[in-house]
Image: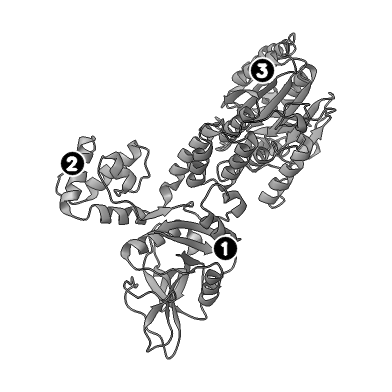
């Protein structure tokens, strides 16, 4: 432990001296300067997958607001100290200095500390040597800048702090408690924004970004909004997203008004005119905030199509890559259906094998049969090219191999797992038809996509639903329960629901354990009558589980996806019948 304490006393005076060095000369009117720190890859402390992504996104946001930024990712304590010293040398008396930190933070005896990648914190005596005190950063900025803005997305749950909380005697009276401690500021131009109230733990987020950073980007640059007013909207959005479990806090002694969307101190009316041949910064920031909340590959691609030359573009491209990796969990049914359509005969499949071998991926014998060796070669090729790893030759894989395919009939537009999408967020990042569908089906959780010109949505809510209620809900939105006319269409619709276990129940029926899924539009009005699609379409295709169901007496039967009890990873694409009193976990709506 002694070497850590020695390091502490060696580094800290250097940091203090550099922070207190003679201020740099400010440009006329002052500069907007920002240091953005994001730490995800901790050596001992639990990893925070979203912290670095949050920092990158906030860096893009600040660049759009005319800040000169310095982005520091995954720094150890020495690297963090050097970045702080480097930043302080830039700050002059007329400048706005902003410090943003996303990562682990902790408090001990009422003092807050920011935790770098190499912190081990085996005891409370390690804290001064292995962390950076927040108070030193705030004090240094207060002494140098005209306006100091500090944003701390650093209340995320810290296993080391939790352990110290147990080990330190008297922790309940000011030890290493959860979250960060209240602070005091001494300057007249300081604002400190916390992701959560004192003692609360802030969420790292489950969909790529933390609720706090997402709300900051979405709200801070609102036209004519002073930062204090804008932060009220941040609090509203975070509380809503976390169901009231997290409430951001603002400590401000600002004697001046500050606008992110305008030059500091300049009234909104005096904002210089902006050329109309490109989107305004406010519109770009608004769309970026929407894309962060929607967070699907399609929404990010729409954003890049509109704002591909903006400061946010790189963060958007990184989000596309991140989500493509996550979506590898999607059912391979859709990819399988594409392969069966595009490479149906042995000769075309042999061409695929030859192309894989030429690309350096061994398929074994070139015989037109896709056995285990060929499937392994396809998956390895997809991994090497950064494609979705399905093991089937879909359109993207064929294109990477230089092979022609038929234009795809289908496209999954949502994530594999169902979510509640906000139609207002989709507006401007999705087709109007999809926006209207989502608005009507709200607040149900959805997956959705297109097949052969039709739009499909798989939906579930807090309660299970009967067939007739599902039928009425679909009709109210201008659609109908799904009609299936081919194996390819069935595989596509099954791919919408097989990536999310909420769409299936386990049930004991007919002496067997079975899995029952969402409603389709097939109905039998009585025992002697025919099966028919509620949409009125002819019955040209069926995919029954085992055999055609029969009604007892005059009972009405409705169809849902159904199969024997299978491992959760297994794909279900067969159908079974249920009577009118039974409920299902969800339903699938089709729109012409």
Q: Residue 225 vs residue 214: left or right? A: right
Q: Position of residue 565 (x, y in %)?
A: 40, 67
Mark 1 surroundings: few (<14), some (14-19) or many (≥20) residues within 10 A: many
Q: Which residue is mark 2?
A: 354
Q: Nearer the viewer, residue 93 or 101?
A: 93
Q: Sequence-wise, which precedes: disc 2 or disc 3?
A: 3
The structure residue drawn at horizontal position 30% and vertical position 39%, both measured from the top left corner, is 400
**Mark 3 — residue?**
87
Residue receiving disc 1: 441
For marks 2 and 1, the one nearer the N-term is: 2
Label 1 residue SS? helix
Structural crowding at the residue carrying mark 3, measured as other residues with C-alpha within 10 Å and reported as few (<14), some (14–19) or many (≥20): many
How far apart, in angstroms, are the residues tagged by discs 2 and 1?
47 Å
* Pick the front one: 47 or 24: 24
| Residue 288 in view in this figure | yes
Left or right placement of residue 193 versus residue 467 in this view? right
């Amino acid at each position: 432990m002694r070497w850590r304490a020695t390091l502490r006393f060696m580094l800290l005076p250097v940091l203090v001296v550099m922070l207190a060095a003679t201020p740099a000369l400010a440009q006329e009117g002052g500069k907007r300067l920002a240091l953005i720190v994001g730490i995800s890859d901790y050596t001992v402390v639990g990893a925070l997958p979203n912290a670095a992504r949050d920092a990158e996104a906030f860096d893009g946001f600040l660049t759009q607001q005319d800040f000169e930024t310095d982005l520091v990712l995954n720094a150890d304590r020495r690297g963090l100290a050097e970045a702080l010293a480097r930043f302080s040398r830039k700050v002059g008396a007329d400048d706005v200095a902003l410090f943003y930190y996303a990562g682990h933070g902790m408090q001990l005896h009422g003092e807050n500390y920011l935790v770098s990648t190499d912190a081990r914190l085996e005891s409370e005596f390690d804290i001064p040597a292995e962390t950076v005190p927040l108070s030193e950063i705030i004090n240094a900025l207060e002494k140098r800048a005209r306006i100091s803005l500090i944003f701390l997305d650093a209340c995320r749950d810290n296993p080391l702090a939790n352990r110290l909380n147990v080990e330190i005697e008297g922790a309940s009276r000011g030890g290493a408690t959860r979250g960060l401690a209240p602070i005091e500021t001494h300057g007249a131009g300081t604002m400190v924004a916390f992701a959560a109230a004192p003692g609360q733990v802030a969420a790292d987020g489950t969909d790529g970004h933390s609720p706090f950073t997402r709300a900051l980007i979405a709200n801070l640059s609102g036209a004519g909004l002073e930062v204090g007013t804008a932060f009220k909207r941040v609090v509203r959005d975070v509380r809503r997203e976390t169901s009231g479990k997290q409430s951001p806090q603002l400590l401000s002694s600002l004697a001046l008004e500050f606008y992110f969307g305008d030059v500091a101190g300049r009234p909104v009316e005096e904002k210089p005119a902006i050329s109309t041949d490109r989107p305004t910064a406010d519109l770009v920031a608004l769309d970026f905030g929407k894309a962060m909340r929607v967070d699907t590959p399609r929404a990010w691609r729409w954003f890049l199509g509109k704002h591909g030359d903006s400061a946010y573009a790189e963060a958007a491209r990184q989000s596309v890559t991140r989500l493509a990796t996550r979506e590898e969990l999607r059912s391979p049914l859709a990819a399988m259906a594409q392969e069966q359509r595009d490479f149906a005969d042995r000769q075309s499949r042999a061409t695929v094998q030859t192309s894989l071998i030429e690309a350096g991926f061994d398929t074994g014998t070139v015989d037109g049969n896709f056995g285990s060796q060929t499937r392994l070669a396809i998956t390895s090729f997809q991994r090497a090219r950064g494609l979705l790893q399905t093991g089937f030759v879909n359109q993207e894989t064929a294109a990477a191999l230089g092979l022609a395919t038929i234009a795809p009939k289908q496209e999954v537009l949502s994530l594999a797992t169902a979510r509640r999408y906000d139609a207002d967020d989709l507006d401007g990042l999705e087709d109007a038809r999809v926006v209207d569908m989502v608005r009507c089906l709200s607040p149900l959780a959805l997956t959705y996509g297109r097949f052969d010109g039709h739009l499909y949505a798989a939906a579930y809510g807090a309660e299970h639903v009967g067939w007739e209620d599902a039928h009425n809900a679909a009709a109210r939105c201008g659609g109908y329960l799904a009609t299936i006319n081919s194996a390819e269409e069935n595989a596509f619709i099954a791919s919408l629901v097989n990536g999310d276990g909420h769409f299936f129940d386990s049930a004991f029926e007919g002496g067997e354990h079975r899995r029952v899924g969402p409603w389709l539009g097939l109905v039998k009005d009585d025992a002697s009558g025919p099966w028919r699609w509620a949409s009125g379409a002819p019955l040209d295709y069926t995919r029954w589980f085992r055999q055609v169901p029969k009604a007892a007496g005059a009972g009405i039967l409705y169809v849902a996806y159904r199969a024997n009890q299978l491992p959760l990873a297994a794909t279900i694409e067969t159908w079974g019948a249920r009577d009118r009193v039974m409920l299902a976990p969800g339903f699938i709506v089709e729109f012409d």
